[in-house]
Amino acid sequence: MIKFFRKIRQKLLTEHKFSKYLTYAFGEIILVVIGILIALQINNWNQKRIENNKEKLILAELIIDLEEQSRLLKDYVETESSFYQNGKDILTHFAKNQTFYDNDTIYAKLNSLASRRTFTPLNTTFQELISTGTIGILKDKPTKRKIIQYYKELERISSVIANNNVHIVDGIYQPEILKQTLFTLDEDDPVLENMNKLIFDRESLNSIRNTSKDLLSDANNTLHLFNLVEQRTIVAQTHVEIYKTIYLQTKDLLFDLNN
């Protein structure tokens, strides 16, 4: 093709047809420019197609993360709800009987509140988007803003729950309640019951239980125990509400991404 155009130019020059040569040369330049513009357009189209495919992949991975986060949040709600219910049961028992001691269930419920669950946000895909700078591929600005705000909220929630667990559950409730109760689920848990039997004889174990009973029944400990249980119950209730709120936000964001 290049040789063909070169021959035409040479023929026009040798025939001294300068006006036709200039017209032809101008037309050839226009053809070259059009060719370049078409090539650029094709390149832009290919680039947009690649970016669109990347965006679809990113959205699909975010949806997978959010669906799993949604499932985990339901588990967190159930766990914290069980803590909250145990706290309510203990306080209700005290209101009716004016004592924190109960032969059947008080040990188990008091001891269960010494446990807690760490909240770990599922944000692998989002962190990768931020670290690699590919978050900019997402074209819809309101949705992108919503995604960023959502994961910032997850970080804030993680910090709040971690602080509550460390400073209130681990730092206050657990060490104080261990001074008051026998740390076992009593006869309700056969594994712990057998373990206690291996360590203690029946007389020693009963002596420890009686000591715990005296402490739980002691009026001088009532205010301290009440404050401990109430504070721990409020923490559990707060966590339940936090998890329910972020669960709804997760579902809302999932709806946006799926659409």
Image (cartoon, rainbow, N blue to C red):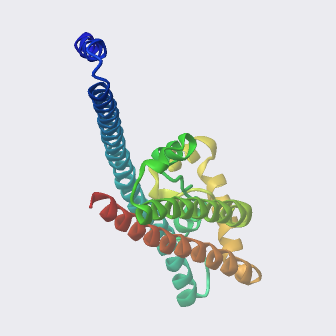
**Could you say which quadrant of the image residue 153 lies in?**
bottom right
Q: Is residue 158 above or below residue 97?
A: above
Give the residue drawn at x 33%, y 64%. Answer: 256
The answer to whether any part of residue 186 appears in the image is yes
Q: How many marks can you see?
A: 0
The answer to whether any part of residue 175 appears in the image is no
**Could you say which quadrant of the image residue 234 lies in?**
bottom right
Closest to the observer, 208 or 4? 4
Residue furthest to the right in view is 220
Q: Is residue 12 above or below residue 164?
A: above
Q: Quadrant for the C terminus, please.
A: bottom left
Closest to the observer, 169 or 108? 169
Give how far across and how far down residue 197 sits, in percent.
56, 45
Residue 24 is left or right of residue 249, and the answer is left
Closest to the observer, 139 or 174? 139
Give the residue drawn at x 71%, y 72%. Answer: 215
Give how far across and how far down residue 64 sits, in percent.
34, 48
Give how far across and how far down residue 208 sits, in percent.
67, 59
Residue 45 is left or right of residue 240, and the answer is left
Q: Is residue 193 above or below residue 102?
A: above
Give the residue drawn at x 68%, y 62%. Answer: 163
Give how far across and how far down residue 4 sits, in percent.
22, 13
Residue 193 is left or right of residue 70, and the answer is right
Q: Quadrant for the N terminus, please.
A: top left
Give the residue drawn at x 49%, y 66%. Answer: 80
